[in-house]
């Protein structure tokens, strides 16, 4: 790492090009998997408003495989960093900002296929006459309803393989970060089986941080597609669908109560439809419901919704 790399300003054009290409690759793969096309919503913010920029929201509703799927790209520039972004760096409060990212959530119809969340992003805080402060964030996590050991191990191994070339200590660090972040404190239970999560991360400079973003981004399809290909043909009935809808309720609770990305989007004046596209279309809340001991539903809680070392 050179001093020049550490001080180099972020190359937003390179990041934008990569992220748009990543969005295209993911959507094309999911369309082949589902058989239906994503709806494309290109949007542009007014050039003279407090929040400027553009993006592309791509959503699939009521697909043959995906009950709901969204893969979003956004590039926004604002006059004031939202409170959710400056919480860990209070010295940057009040600065302008620029944020670029791709974020997705995919909700398969088949309860044996897990929901998956993924995002990669860069946030840049700016002030006149000062070098920009920037950091990368992102990761991926898996939320199964009926979980399988080999799927969980594969998902985590792919995450580890994406990070090990940079630093072998990063996977355990980012895995722990994910376990702690995607945790419903009010329920005292994990959202799923985790993965990796990182935020406020520079990698020591733009070039390294950007390389990590690309490695994580490029690993997503390898982490997820083999799992759904194994499970998509498994038969299911109303019992499995009901449990899936119950567990999706936990997903909604986390996104609305705890997720920093949701808070950042809403606090910064982002597009509500794009921000909330992550919500599953069918959800249920059963009062004080608990699975019967010894059932496949109970196994999710006892064997998978616990902190484990998968690789």
Image (spheres, helix red, strand yellow):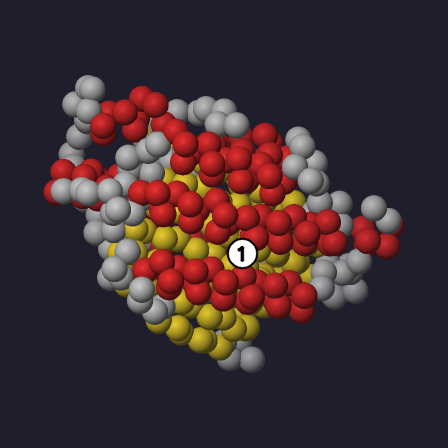
Answer with the quarter of the image where residue 193 lies.
top left
The one nearer the camera, 154 or 68, is: 154
Residue 185 in sight: no
Return the residue found at the far top.
293
User: Does dot 1 land on a helix, a strand or a loop?
Assistant: loop
Return the residue found at the far left.
238
Q: Which residue corresponds to the image point at 50% horizontal and 48% vertical from the top-left?
A: 222
Q: Check the image and report above or below for 16 versus 234.
A: below
Answer with the quarter of the image where residue 293 lies.
top left
**Residue assigned mark 1:** 82
Q: Check the image and report above or below for 171 versus 63.
A: above
The one nearer the camera, 1 or 289, is: 1
- Rendered location of residue 91, percent (x, y): 67, 48
Return the residue found at the far bottom.
47
Residue 239 in sight: yes
The one nearer the camera, 33 or 114, is: 33
Number of callouts: 1
Answer with the quarter of the image where residue 127 lies.
bottom right
The one nearer the camera, 70 or 198, is: 70
Q: Which residue corresponds to the image point at 36% horizontal and 58% vertical from the top-left?
A: 33
Return the residue found at the far right.
3
Q: Left or right: where does residue 120 sit relative to residue 95?
A: left
Q: Left or right: where does residue 7 sit relative to residue 252?
A: right
- Rendered location of residue 131, percent (x, y): 77, 59
Q: Which residue corresponds to the image point at 66% horizontal and 58% vertical from the top-left?
A: 125
- Rendered location of residue 87, percent (x, y): 57, 45
- Rendered location of residue 225, percent (x, y): 42, 49
Q: Which residue corresponds to the image point at 40% horizontal and 36% vertical from the top-left?
A: 151
Give the class, few, some or many, for how many residues have Cα within 10 Å of label 1's Cα (few <14, many ≥20).
Answer: many
């Amino acid at each position: 790492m050179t001093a020049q790399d550490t001080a180099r300003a972020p190359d937003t054009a390179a990041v934008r090009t990569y992220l748009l290409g990543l969005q295209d690759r993911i959507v094309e793969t999911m369309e082949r998997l589902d058989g239906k096309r994503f709806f494309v919503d290109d949007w542009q913010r007014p050039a003279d408003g407090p929040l400027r920029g553009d993006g592309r929201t791509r959503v699939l509703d009521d697909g043959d495989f995906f009950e709901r799927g969204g893969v979003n790209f956004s590039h926004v520039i604002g006059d004031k960093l939202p409170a959710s972004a400056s919480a860990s760096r209070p010295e940057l409060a009040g600065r302008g900002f620029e944020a670029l990212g791709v974020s997705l959530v995919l909700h398969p119809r088949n309860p044996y296929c897990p929901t998956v969340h993924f995002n990669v992003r860069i946030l840049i805080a700016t002030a006149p006459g000062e070098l920009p402060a920037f950091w990368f964030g992102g990761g991926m996590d898996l939320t199964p309803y009926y979980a399988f050991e080999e799927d969980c191990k594969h998902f985590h191994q792919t995450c580890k393989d994406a990070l090990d070339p940079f630093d072998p200590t990063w996977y355990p660090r980012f895995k722990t970060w994910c376990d702690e972040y995607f945790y419903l404190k009010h329920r005292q239970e994990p959202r799923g089986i985790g993965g990796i999560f990182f935020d406020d991360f520079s990698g020591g400079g733009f070039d390294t941080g950007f390389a990590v973003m690309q490695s994580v981004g490029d690993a997503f399809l390898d982490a997820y597609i083999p799992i759904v290909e194994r499970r998509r043909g498994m038969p299911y009935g109303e019992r499995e669908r009901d449990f899936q809808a119950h567990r999706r309720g936990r997903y909604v609770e986390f996104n609305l109560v705890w997720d920093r990305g949701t808070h950042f989007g809403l606090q910064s004046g982002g597009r509500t439809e794009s921000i909330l596209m992550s919500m599953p279309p069918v959800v249920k809340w059963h009062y004080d419901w608990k699975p019967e001991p010894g059932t496949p539903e109970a196994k999710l809680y006892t064997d998978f919704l616990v902190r484990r070392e998968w690789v």
